[in-house]
């Protein structure tokens, strides 16, 4: 029972963080643009990465697409 609660909390945290960071990247938050700009990423690429992050956060919340969401979240971080 405790394991299921802990697992549910981790899924909620991953979903929240994916959606929050994805929206910040899509909206072009100055902190995100500064961070990715330091690595030489142009703004359009940050937007694409934001869409990928947002989509993966949503997919993690859906039980049938949980693995796809995690795969997308991991592969979006090159």
Image (cartoon, rainbow, N blue to C red):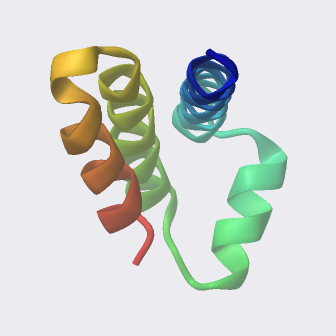
Q: Quadrant of the C terminus?
A: bottom left
Residue at horizontal 70%, vertical 21%? 2
Q: Position of residue 16 (x, y in %)?
A: 64, 22
Above or below, comparing residue 35 to residue 23 in the picture: below
**Count of numbered badges drawn on the protein:** 0
Q: Is residue 10 left or right of residue 76?
A: right
Dividing the picture into quadrants, the one containing residue 52 is top left
Residue at horizontal 68%, vertical 27%? 6
Q: Position of residue 51 (x, y in %)?
A: 37, 36
Q: Position of residue 59 (x, y in %)?
A: 30, 25
Q: Position of residue 74 (x, y in %)?
A: 38, 62
Residue at horizontal 49%, vertical 55%? 46
| Between 72 and 36, the one nearer to me in the picture | 72
Dividing the picture into quadrants, the one containing residue 20 is top right
Query: Which residue is situated farthest in the right direction here?
Result: 31
Q: Is residue 32 left or right of residue 16?
A: right
| Between 25 and 71, the one nearer to me in the picture | 71
Q: Is residue 72 left or right of residue 41?
A: left
Q: Quadrant of the N terminus?
A: top right
Q: Is residue 43 left or right of residue 5?
A: left
| Between 21 and 5, the one nearer to me in the picture | 5
Above or below, comparing residue 4 to residue 30 in the picture: above
Query: Which residue is situated farthest in the front direction here?
Result: 1
Dividing the picture into quadrants, the one containing residue 23 is top right
Residue at horizontal 27%, vertical 17%? 63
């Amino acid at each position: 029972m405790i394991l299921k609660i802990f697992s549910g909390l981790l899924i909620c945290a991953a979903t929240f963080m994916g959606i929050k960071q994805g929206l910040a990247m899509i909206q072009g938050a100055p902190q995100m643009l500064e961070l990715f700009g330091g690595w030489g990423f142009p703004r359009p690429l940050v937007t694409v990465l934001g869409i990928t992050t947002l989509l993966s956060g949503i997919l993690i919340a859906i039980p049938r697409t949980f693995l796809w969401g995690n795969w997308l979240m991991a592969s979006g971080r090159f």
